[in-house]
Image (cartoon, rainbow, N blue to C red):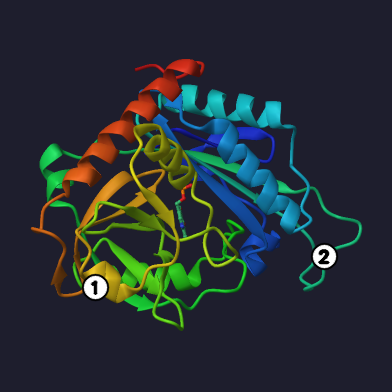
Amino acid sequence: MPRYAYVNGRFAPHKQAAVHIEDRGYQFADGVYEVIPVHRGRVVDEALHLDRLEYSLGELSIAMPVSRASMRLIAHELMRRNALTNGFLYMQVTRGVAPRSHPFPKPAPRPALVMTTRQLPVPSEEAIERGISVVSTPDQRWARCDIKSISLLPNVLAKELAASQGCAEAFQIDDEGYVTEAAASNAWIVTHEGTVVTRQLDTDILSGITRLSLQRVIEDLGYRLEIRPFTLDEAYTAREAFITASTQYVMPVTRIDERIIGNGRAGILTTALRQAYTQHVVEQGEGADRFAAS
Ligand SMILES: Cc1ncc(COP(=O)(O)O)c(C=O)c1O
């Protein structure tokens, strides 16, 4: 259990940290969030995450609660207080507190800012080699999945379906049979020709920061990359499959529904990409300031 959380201007003991019952995040899910990975006490791809936070807020006409520089200072002070080494920083911004009424309150309330940290264990080599199992489920989300909204009910239901079947993730399928993304990660396959495939960015998926960084890694390594939709059937018969997310890095997918992918173990290209992405994390972290005790 982390010791502290940050809530609207102060560091509070985590157990007692609370927001107002008329916070619009609580009543309308009127807010956005970020999950930023922390590796060996260093923040990974921080600028890209803050860019996405600003984008999500802008799309909802919510102001940044404090300056970008202050966001960084608060985040790093919280990491220091919680001695965070490996895990993630969680940032949530909501439109603020106002009497319950759907339209934006006028004048705009002060946006509410909450930050927490979570320490995560580093997965074993065996767990990565085994990969994860995934279920497929219709994509029931709204038409602006590019906004990292705290309104996550369809994702919660998809994850619960996965958990009920002993799976770690759910591939969400659009009306035409294409995989949009997973419930909390981006979806990728590797074809039998060795081409890496992931869906294009549009309003149907979140622009994952891990996806973005991995794309650069793939280009640097000279692997073939196709940015296009792929169907669930194509995923079933792919040579390899994997997901990307801030807390997962590159995680092999070795089963989708009842279909075993490849030989049922992490694919060769997926393993190479995980190693190269991890290298990016280490190098990226070395360029960042160190704040937490390790
Ligand atoms: C729906 C969805 N897609 C993709 C991602 C991956 O994004 P990132 O790589 O920035 O963690 C997430 C992460 O939480 C997500 O919730």
Where is mark 1, residue-wise? Answer: 164
Residue for point 15% across, 75% down: 258
Residue 183 lies in quadrant: bottom left
Residue 21 lies in quadrant: bottom right
Q: Nearer the viewer, residue 136 or 237?
A: 237
Residue for point 74% across, 41% down: 65
**Looking at the image, can residue 66 be seen?**
yes
Cα distance in 3D space between marks 1 and 2: 38 Å
Q: Which amino acid does label 1 sit on?
A: Ser
Which residue occupies the extreme bottom position in the image? Answer: 175
Indicate whether 133 appears above or below 5.
Answer: below
**Looking at the image, can residue 290 be seen?**
no
Instruction: Indicate left or right for 167 with 205 as reference.
Output: left
How many residues crowd mark 1 within 10 Å: few (<14), some (14–19), many (20+)? few
How many residues crowd mark 2 within 10 Å: few (<14), some (14–19), many (20+)? some
Residue 95: percent from left, percent from top: 74, 55
Residue 138: percent from left, percent from top: 40, 80
Where is mark 2, residue-wise? Answer: 104
